[in-house]
Image: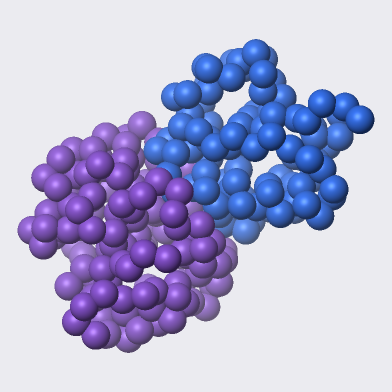
Chain colours: A blue, B purple
């Protein structure tokens, strides 16, 4: 069994939107039998996880480059395109 | 779940505004007046919206969910405004894009990670075109209050 993937869930304030996204990913992981290390943070705190994170899912997209993939999580809030986003996340997690 | 302050006095209808700053000043100013948030809330929410936009294009009318850090909040509340004419907000996660927002929900939360079910319910409202259209066109604050109280599962404090 490979090491648990660390997934960062970030929004601007670390209060509202990331909470929703965090819940959605938790559910998705359960459905797919994935064991994840989910970390809910503010986007400004991503810098502290550069060495450990495998994926960043965020509603506060920045232009900054990170050493791991970044997925836009807005669809979890509006429902538009949410299946595509889930597929994208799953693909990254199964790598 | 902790109690939330929600009544007609924080529901603003036919708001006549030109910019998103006008919206935030009108809604935030009302919350300051009522003592639900601190005076620092106004600057904080405008700064946050500028840095991290909260406009959400939906299948119905676009919405925005401005929010900021918990330290500016005295009492957990959600203020709702329906704008006379839509105002452009930046799109969450796509700062280059804007969306014409008709309904604004200011989320004044007093704890960082204590509102998952409330937020999930709110997102369900955003995914329901019929509900959004109803909110955009309803003229009775009491009807809006009752609908949102039911849809969001509010536990109301005082006044009911």
Between residue A72 and residue B33, name the one nearer to us: B33
Residue A81 seen in the current view = no
Between residue A89 and residue A29, name the one nearer to us: A29
Label count reads 0
Quadrant for residue B17, please give it: bottom left
Quadrant showing the C terminus of chain B: bottom left
Residue B139 horizontal/vertical position (percent): 27, 83
Residue B133 horizontal/vertical position (percent): 45, 75
User: What residue appears at the point 45 percent right and 57 percent down from the top-left corner?
Assistant: B115
Quadrant showing the N terminus of chain B: bottom left
Q: Is residue B99 left or right of residue A50?
A: left
User: What residue appears at the point 45 percent right and 72 percent down from the top-left corner?
Assistant: B152
Quadrant for residue A77, please give it: bottom right
User: What residue appears at the point 31 percent right and 62 percent down from the top-left corner?
Assistant: B78
Q: Is residue B33 above or below residue B5?
A: above
Residue A31 horizontal/vertical position (percent): 81, 55
Q: Residue furthest left?
A: B33
Q: Is residue A5 left or right of residue A18?
A: right
User: What residue appears at the point 52 percent right and 17 percent down from the top-left corner?
Assistant: A47
């Amino acid at each position: 069994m490979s090491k648990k993937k660390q997934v960062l869930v970030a929004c601007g304030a670390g209060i509202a939107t990331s909470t929703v996204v965090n819940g959605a990913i938790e559910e998705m992981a359960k459905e797919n039998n994935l064991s994840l290390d989910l970390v809910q943070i503010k986007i400004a705190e991503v810098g502290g996880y550069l060495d450990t994170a495998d994926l960043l899912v965020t509603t506060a997209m920045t232009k900054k480059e990170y050493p791991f993939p970044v997925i836009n999580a807005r669809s979890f809030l509006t429902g538009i395109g949410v299946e595509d986003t889930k597929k994208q996340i799953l693909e990254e997690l199964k790598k | 779940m902790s109690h939330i302050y929600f009544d007609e006095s924080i529901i603003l209808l036919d708001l006549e505004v030109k910019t998103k700053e006008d919206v935030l000043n009108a809604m935030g100013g009302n919350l300051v007046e009522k003592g639900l948030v601190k005076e620092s809330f106004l600057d904080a929410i405008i700064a946050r919206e500028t840095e991290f936009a909260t406009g959400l294009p939906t299948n119905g009318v676009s919405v925005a969910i401005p929010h900021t850090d918990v330290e500016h909040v005295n009492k957990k509340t959600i203020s709702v405004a329906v704008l006379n004419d839509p105002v452009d907000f930046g799109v969450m996660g796509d700062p280059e894009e804007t969306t014409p927002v008709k309904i604004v929900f200011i989320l004044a939360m007093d704890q960082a990670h204590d509102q998952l079910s409330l937020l999930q319910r709110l997102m369900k409202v955003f995914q329901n075109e019929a509900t959004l259209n109803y909110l955009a066109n309803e003229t009775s604050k009491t009807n809006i209050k009752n609908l949102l109280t039911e849809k969001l599962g509010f536990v109301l404090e005082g006044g009911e």
